[in-house]
Image (cartoon, rainbow, N blue to C red):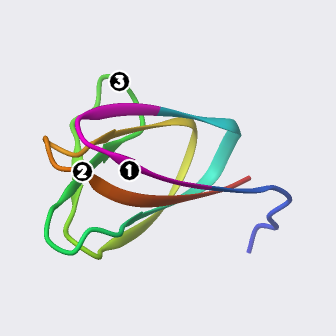
Amino acid sequence: MASIANFQPVEGSVTNTATLALDRRARFIEIINDDDTNPLKFKFNDGESYGTLKAKESITVPVHSAEVYLDGNGNAINYRIRSMS
């Protein structure tokens, strides 16, 4: 298993679209949708299609990215992101 030298937690709320810039390019990114009812859309590159996390769902992705694009689709959705590099 790869060792992790840097860890960056990010918490917030998104209503429409937002681009989060991380401190450094991550090797793994965990995204957690803390909303009780609404889905949260996410992607890592501008040209990609959005993936969707259902309410209270999370995903850990091995990806080399320094940005995360989020979309709450008009709903105020609380999220947590853990960036590991």
Task: Determine the secondary structure under disc 3.
Answer: loop
Residue at which label 1 appears: 13
- Which image quadrant is residue 24 in? top right
Whether label 1 touches label 2, CB < 8 Å: yes
Task: Determine the secondary structure under disc 2.
Answer: loop
Please state the extent of the stretch shown in magenta in the rendering: 10-19
Which of pointers 2 and 3 indicates the residue nearer the eye? 2
Graded by Cα atoms within 10 Å as few (under 14), some (14 to 19) or many (20 or more), the crowding at tag 1 reads some
Specify the amino acid type for callout 2.
Ala
Residue at which label 2 appears: 76
Task: State how far apart marks 1 and 3 are (Cα).
Answer: 20 Å
Residue found at the very far top of the displayed protein: 47
Q: Residue at the spot x=86%, y=59% of the render? A: 5
Percent across and percent down for residue 29 are 54, 56
Horizontal side of residue 74 vs 34, given as left or right:
left
Task: State how far apart marks 2 and 3 are (Cα).
Answer: 22 Å
Mark 2 or mark 1, which is nearer the start of the sequence?
1
Task: Determine the secondary structure under disc 1.
Answer: strand
Q: Is residue 37 magenta?
A: no
Q: Residue at the spot x=29%, y=76% of the render? A: 56
Task: State how far apart marks 1 and 2 are (Cα).
Answer: 6 Å
Specify the amino acid type for callout 3.
Asp
